[in-house]
Amino acid sequence: MKNSEFIMESLDRLFPDAKCELHHKNHFELLIAVVLSAQTTDERVNSVTPELFEKYPDAYVLANADLKDVETIIKPIGLYHNKAINIIKLAKVLCEYHNGVVPGKREDLEALPGVGRKTANVILSNCFDVPAFAVDTHVSRVSKRLEIADEDDDVSEIERKLMEFFPKEKWVKLHHQFIFFGRYKCKAKKPECEDCPFNGNCTETRT
C-alpha cells in the first residue's frame, strides 16, 4: 500500500475529526499529560490528571510539589515514581529557564526532563501548529502494515519516511488519524480487517 492520496482520503472518511484525546486546557497541562502517557493509555492518564491539575495548575505550583503526593495521585498509570520525579523536575526547569511557560522550540522542549522527540513533536504540532509527525506505537504499527515503513525501521526512520511520503501540511492531522486508526481499527491484536479500506493491500491481509 503505497498510495498517499488513497490513504489520506480513506483516513479522512474514517476519522475526519481525529484529535488529541488527552484532556487538557492549556499547553502546560498537555505537556504534563503527554509525559505521563508513556507506556500507558490516554484513558488512564485522563483518569488521574483532573486531580493532578486541580492541585498543581501550573509549573510554579508543581515545581514545589511533594514527591510522595504526586506519586499517590498518578500511581494508577504505572511507572509513577519516575514520572513524578520527571514532571516535578520539568516544572522546575520551566520556571527557571522559561518563566513557567512551555517553550515552542524543539531544542528547548527536548532539554526538559522526561521529554523526547515524540513528546516534543506532539507539543509542537498541537500547541504551536508546527508541522510534525509524532511516532507512537500505533503510528509505528500502521506505517509498517501499510508498507510506508519497513518492519525493522526504528522510530526515527519511520518518522523520516512518513514526512517524505505525505505532504507537510497534512502531518498534524495524519498523526491523529494514524493514532485513531491504530487504536480503534488496525489494532495490534485482532485488527478489524473485514471492512477496512486497505483490506488486501497491507501486510496483515495480503495473501
Image (cartoon, rainbow, N blue to C red):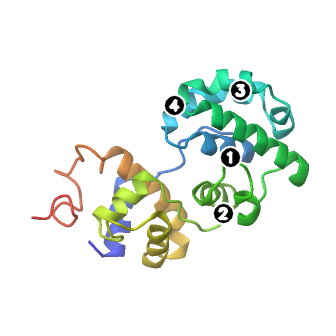
Residue 76 location, x and y as percent? 54, 25
- Which circle marks residue 70 in the picture? 3
Left or right, 163 with respect to 199, comes to right
Which is more foreground, mark 3 or mark 1?
3
Q: Position of residue 197 (x, y in %)?
A: 24, 60
Q: Residues within 10 Å of mark 3 (few under 14, many from 20)?
A: many
Mark 2 vs mark 4, CA separation in Å: 26 Å
Distance in Å between CA atoms under marks 1 and 2: 15 Å
Identify the residue position indicated by label 2 in the image. Answer: 129
- C-alpha distance separating marks 3 and 1: 16 Å
Q: Earlier in the sequence, mark 3 or mark 1?
A: 1
Q: CA distance from mark 1 to mark 4?
A: 16 Å
Amino acid type of the residue that numbered disc 4 sits on in the rendered structure: Arg
User: Which residue ends up furthest to the bottom in the rendered image?
Assistant: 164
Earlier-in-chain disc, 1 versus 4: 1
Q: Residue at x 84, y 43 (%)?
A: 92
